[in-house]
Image: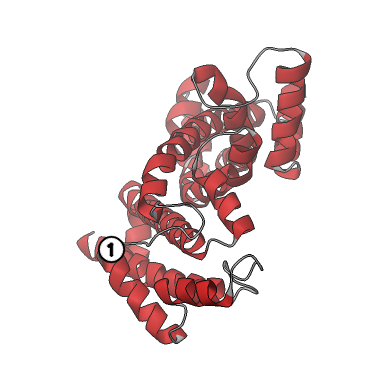
């Protein structure tokens, strides 16, 4: 198991380094720059470029960025006065993390329940309802879902607030908007996995032994059917966190997604690069943790990974 963990850790480090490299050069090669807006004199623009190191060759800029990154320095924002990227992340990430956790817990819990009930009621009305929810969840973009929820539950019926992040009631609509795709994906996968497991020989053997339906379902079907769901937890975390980008702007939540969108619009290179690297590293680590947990749950995985 130690070799398996070290291998996953090494792969994660290489992935993060590749991510930093690709994102750095892509951001630097974007058309235009933060200072060519016509409002600065050539002298001021040259001074700003020198201050941020833009006057140096790209390889030198890259090595300087890596050196600063090792020391935990992601630089200063080019648009927000006296604000570092680290300060922005510290102030905004707790909102995004809290929203993401709420969305994940809600979507995975309800997704598993829907998938289980759909499989146990195959071909019945409940099954078709669950399938319909899954189709809607995987077809409708999160920002459209968020707008629909705002209109009906906030504006038309006045049941829930449609903006800001001041209490539990403010988290309900954005959590549903972000997590609905994940809920649909989990329910669909759980249903398919349950239907596949029910055809296995050990289920037929359990039925032949006269075990109760509850025991067969809980001890044999669900425990084995949930394994494929664990494998997609990493990508689901990515889907939830990237989904916060637009939703945070839509619901006026002061999270990282809101600042990220604003940084892209204003071509704030240091903010774009720093937040992208942070998000990417966070997702790589999340996937690594899921892989390790899956190795504990299913020994065949870590044996295959040796």
Q: Between residue 62 and residue 229, name the one nearer to us.
A: 62
Q: Would residue 187 appear left or right of 24 to someone viewing this image?
A: right
Quarter of the figure that contains the N terminus = bottom left
Give the image location of residue 214, x and y in percent: 49, 21
Image vertical order of residue 161 relative to residue 247, above or below: above
Q: Between residue 271 and residue 96, name the one nearer to us.
A: 271
How is the protein colored in the picture?
A: secondary structure
Residue at 49% from the left image edge and 37% from the top image edge: 100
Under tag 1, what secondary structure? helix
Image vertical order of residue 62 relative to residue 194, above or below: below
Residue 172 visible, this angle: yes
Give the image location of residue 251, x and y in percent: 62, 32
Determine the image quadrant of residue 145.
top right
Give the image location of residue 108, x and y in percent: 52, 34
Q: Between residue 10 and residue 83, name the one nearer to us.
A: 83
Q: How many discs appear?
A: 1
Residue at 33% from the left image edge and 60% from the top image edge: 302
Image vertical order of residue 258 relative to residue 51, above or below: above
Instruction: Give the class, few, some or many, for how many residues have Cα within 10 Å of label 1's Cα (few <14, many ≥20).
Output: some
Determine the image quadrant of residue 16.
bottom left
Q: Between residue 46 and residue 260, name the one nearer to us.
A: 46
Residue at 64% from the left image edge and 16% from the top image edge: 160
Q: Residue furthest left?
A: 2
Give the image location of residue 279, x and y in percent: 45, 54
Q: Which residue is mark 1?
A: 4
Residue 183 visible, this angle: no
């Amino acid at each position: 198991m130690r070799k398996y963990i070290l291998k996953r850790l090494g792969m994660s480090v290489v992935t993060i380094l590749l991510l930093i490299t690709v994102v750095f050069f892509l951001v630097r090669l974007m058309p235009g720059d933060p200072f060519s807006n016509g409002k600065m004199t050539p002298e001021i623009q040259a001074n700003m470029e020198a201050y941020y190191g833009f006057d140096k060759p790209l390889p030198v800029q890259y090595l300087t960025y890596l050196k600063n990154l090792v020391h935990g320095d992601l630089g200063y924002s080019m648009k927000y006065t006296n604000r570092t990227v680290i300060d922005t992340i510290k102030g905004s990430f707790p909102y995004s993390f809290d929203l993401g956790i709420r969305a994940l817990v809600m979507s995975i819990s309800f997704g598993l329940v829907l998938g289980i009930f759909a499989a146990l009621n195959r071909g019945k009305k409940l099954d078709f309802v669950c399938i319909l929810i899954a189709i809607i969840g995987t077809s409708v973009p999160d920002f459209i879902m968020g707008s629909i929820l705002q209109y009906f539950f906030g504006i038309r019926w006045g049941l829930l607030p449609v903006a800001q992040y001041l209490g539990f009631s403010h988290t309900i609509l954005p959590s549903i908007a972000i997590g609905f795709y994940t809920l649909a994906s989990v329910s669909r996968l759980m249903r398919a996995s349950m239907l596949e497991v029910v055809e296995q020989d050990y289920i037929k053997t359990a039925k032949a032994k006269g075990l109760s339906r509850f025991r067969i379902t809980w001890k044999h079907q669900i425990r084995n059917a949930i394994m494929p769901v664990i494998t997609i937890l990493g990508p689901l975390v990515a889907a939830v966190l990237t989904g916060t980008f637009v939703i945070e702007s839509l619901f006026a939540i002061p999270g990282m997604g809101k600042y990220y969108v604003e940084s892209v619009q204003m071509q704030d290179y240091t903010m774009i690069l720093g937040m992208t690297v942070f998000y990417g590293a966070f997702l790589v680590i999340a996937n690594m943790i899921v892989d390790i947990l899956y190795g504990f749950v299913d020994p065949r995985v870590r044996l295959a990974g040796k």
